Image: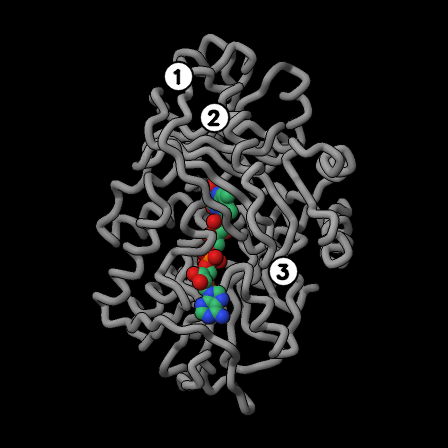
Amino acid sequence: MSQHILVVGAGVIGAAIAHDLQRRGRRVTLIDRDAPGMGASFGNMASIAVTEFVPVSRPAVLRQIPSWLFNPDGPVAVRPGYLPRLFPWFARFVMAARPARARAIEAAGAALCAPALRDTQALLADLGAADLLNDTGCLALYAGDAEFASDRDHVAALDRFGVDYQPLDRAALTALEPELAPLITRALLFPDNRSLRDPHRYVTALVDRFQALGGTLRRAEVTGVDRSDRVTGLRLSDGETLSGDAVVLCAGAHTARLARDLREPIPLETERGYHTQIMAPGIKLRHALIWPARAFMVTPTAGGIRVGGTVEMAGLDAPPDWNRARLTVRHARAALPGLQVQQTSEWMGHRPALPDTVPILSPSARTRGLFYATGHGHLGVTQAATTARLMGQLIDGATPDLDLRPYRVDRF
Ligand SMILES: Cc1cc2nc3c(=O)[nH]c(=O)nc-3n(C[C@H](O)[C@H](O)[C@H](O)COP(=O)(O)OP(=O)(O)OC[C@H]3O[C@@H](n4cnc5c(N)ncnc54)[C@H](O)[C@@H]3O)c2cc1C
C-alpha cells in the first residue's frame, strides 16, 4: 500500500483524483506549476457530453479531412509547418478507424460516458456544489435533412448503446429555443448532456475540498520522476525533490514530456481549441447547443454565453491564432441571429488528445508506483468524476468497477 501519493497536474483530472484519494484516507500532495484549473480545464465548453463517445477517427470524418485542410473556415486547421511532426500521430489516428478497432474504441468510450452524469452529480453533491450543473440538456443542430443524414453514424451509435435522445422538428425546436435561426430545421435533444455553469469552479471546488480534507497543494514545476526499482519521488524545477511512494501523472497535454523521460512514450498531441466568452449576449439561452457540421458549441454559463470548439493542430508552443475563435462566433451568429457580440474575452487551451480517443487510465508498464490518467481529449470534464473513482480504486489496491485493460498505457 502506497504511503504518500504525488499527483502531478491540478486540472480537472488531477484535482478529481487527488480529492478521491484523499477522501479514501490517503496522504496526497497535488502539484501544479500554475494555480489550479488554469489549463484546458479553465475554458472548455463545460458540457457533460455523454453522447460524444463516438471516436473522432471514423470514415465519415476521414473523408472530410482533405477539404478541411484547404478551408481556413473548416472545423480542423493544421499549421503547415507542424505537419511533419504530426504525421506519426495522424498515421495512428487513421489506423484507429479500422472497423474492428473503431468498435472497440467506441465501447471503451461509451463505458466511461455511461456513468458520467451520475458520477458528476454525486461528486458535485459531495462538494456542496450541485448548483454548478445546469438542469437542461444540449441541442444538436442541423441545417437541413442532408446535414442530419451526414450525422447518421453518431445516431446509430447512440442506438447501439441505448443513449437517450429526442428528435425535434422546427416547431418543437422553436418552442424550446426561440432564438434559433430558421436555417436550423432539425435538432436532436440530448437530455443527459448537461453543462456546468462554470467549469473552472468545478476544479477550485475539488481543490478546496481536497485541502479541507487534509490534502496538500504545492505550486511547483515538475521536471522529472525519480525511481529506483520503483517510484521514489519527483524532481522540481527549483532543484528540490519531493519524496513519495506513488506518482500519478495527470499533466494534460504536457504529460508526454514527462513520460518520455521515463522511456514510456505516449502518442499524445494537443488538439488546440478556442472560446469566446460573451458577457452581454443580448439573448437568453436555455440549452447548450452543438452544431456537428461546423464542430462548435454554444454554452450558457454563469458569466454569459460561451462560444467555442474547433480543432487546431499546431503543437504546444505556437502562439494562438485568434481567427479560430472568431470563426466560431461567426458560426454562432448564423445559428443565433440575435446574438450581440459585446464585452468579450478570448481563450485558447490544449486538449490532451490520443490518436484513438481513448484516455489512458493505467499503471505504468515499466515503473512500479507510477500511474497515468491523461488523454481525455474532448471529454475531460465529462469523464473526470468517473476517472477519479476508477483511478482511486486502482491506486488504492481495490479492483476497479470497470475492466481497465482498454485504457492501458502500453496499448500503442
Ligand atoms: C475549447 C475546448 C472545449 C472543450 N469542451 C469540453 C466539453 O464541453 N466537455 C468536456 O468534457 N471536455 C471539454 N474539453 C476538454 C477538457 O477541457 C479536457 O479534456 C480537460 O480539461 C483535460 O483536463 P486535464 O486535467 O487532463 O488537463 P489540464 O486541465 O490541461 O491540466 C493539466 C495541468 O497540469 C499542469 N502541468 C503540466 N505540466 C506540468 C509540470 N511539468 N509540472 C507541474 N504542473 C504541470 C498544468 O499547469 C495544468 O494545470 C474542451 C477542451 C477545449 C480546449
- The residue mark sitting in front, 3 or 1, is 3
Residue 57 occupies quadrant: top right
The image position of residue 117, as x and y in percent, is 40, 43
Mark 3 lies on a secondary structure that is loop
Q: Report the residue at 36% width, 66% height from top.
A: 18
The image position of residue 404, as x and y in percent, is 55, 62
Residue 389 occupies quadrant: bottom left
In front of the other: 77 or 411: 77
The image position of residue 27, as x and y in percent, is 31, 77
In front of the other: 195 or 278: 278
Please state the total of marks drawn on the protein image. Answer: 3
Residue 360 occupies quadrant: bottom right
Residue that numbered label 3 is attached to: 268
Q: Report the residue at 38% width, 56% height from top.
A: 37
Residue 176 tag number = 1
Q: Report the residue at 61% width, 41% height from top.
A: 54
Task: Specify the quadrant that holds the N terminus.
Answer: bottom left
Q: Amino acid at mark 2?
A: Leu
Q: Residues within 10 Å of mark 2 (few under 14, many from 20)?
A: many
Q: Amino acid at mark 3?
A: Leu
In front of the other: 24 or 76: 76
Q: Amino acid at mark 1?
A: Leu
- The residue mark sitting in front, 2 or 3, is 3
Residue that numbered label 2 is attached to: 139
